[in-house]
Image (cartoon, rainbow, N blue to C red):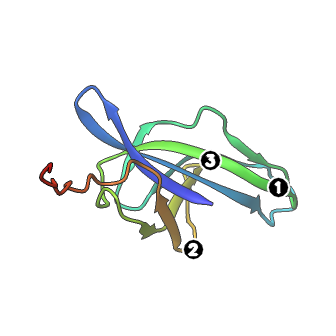
Amino acid sequence: MSVWCIALAGTEKWMQVGFSADFTHDDPEQTLILIDAFPEGTRTAHPFREHIEIAPSELVTPEYQVWMMVKPVVSEEGKNWTTRIVFVDQLKRRYKSQRVEFTWAGPRPQVAATATPAK
């Protein structure tokens, strides 16, 4: 599952983005360490707390949980959003995911109530 919502840093709006994924790479000798990730069109507001370490020719599973705080807000509040995630490794190489749909996980928009006159 992939979700997103708005977070506040003082009065500044950020995006909180989370998803689960399996990771692998095919280098038989070098460990790959993912040190950052962010949706296309954003930048990291807070770097990863825990790097994702992938040993040579190994699959990291089941569904590693990834959470990030990014800015600017590039989607409309209250709506699902589709994008790619950019991952950065220890050598600063970038990798892009397939397109992923993120489900809005924030509060539902307020619907104006219709007043009914009291009898």
Where residue 62 is drawn, which disc sits there?
A: 1
Q: Residues within 10 Å of mark 3 (few under 14, many from 20)?
A: some
Q: Where, by quadrant of the figure, is residue 48 drawn?
A: top right
Image point (41%, 48%), residue name: 106
Q: Amino acid at mark 3?
A: Val
- Mark-to-mark CA distance, 2 and 3: 16 Å
Image point (60%, 32%), residue name: 49
Q: Amino acid at mark 1?
A: Pro
Q: Answer whether labels 1 and 2 touch (C-beta < 8 Å).
A: no
* In the depicted structure, whether residue 2 falls above or below residue 90: below
- Mark-to-mark CA distance, 1 and 3: 12 Å
Q: Amino acid at mark 2?
A: Gln
Q: Answer with mark 2 or mark 3, whichever residue precedes in sequence.
A: 3
**Farthest-out residue, front:** 119
* In the depicted structure, whether residue 66 falls above or below residue 49: below
Q: Residues within 10 Å of mark 1 (few under 14, many from 20)?
A: few
Q: Which residue is mark 3?
A: 66
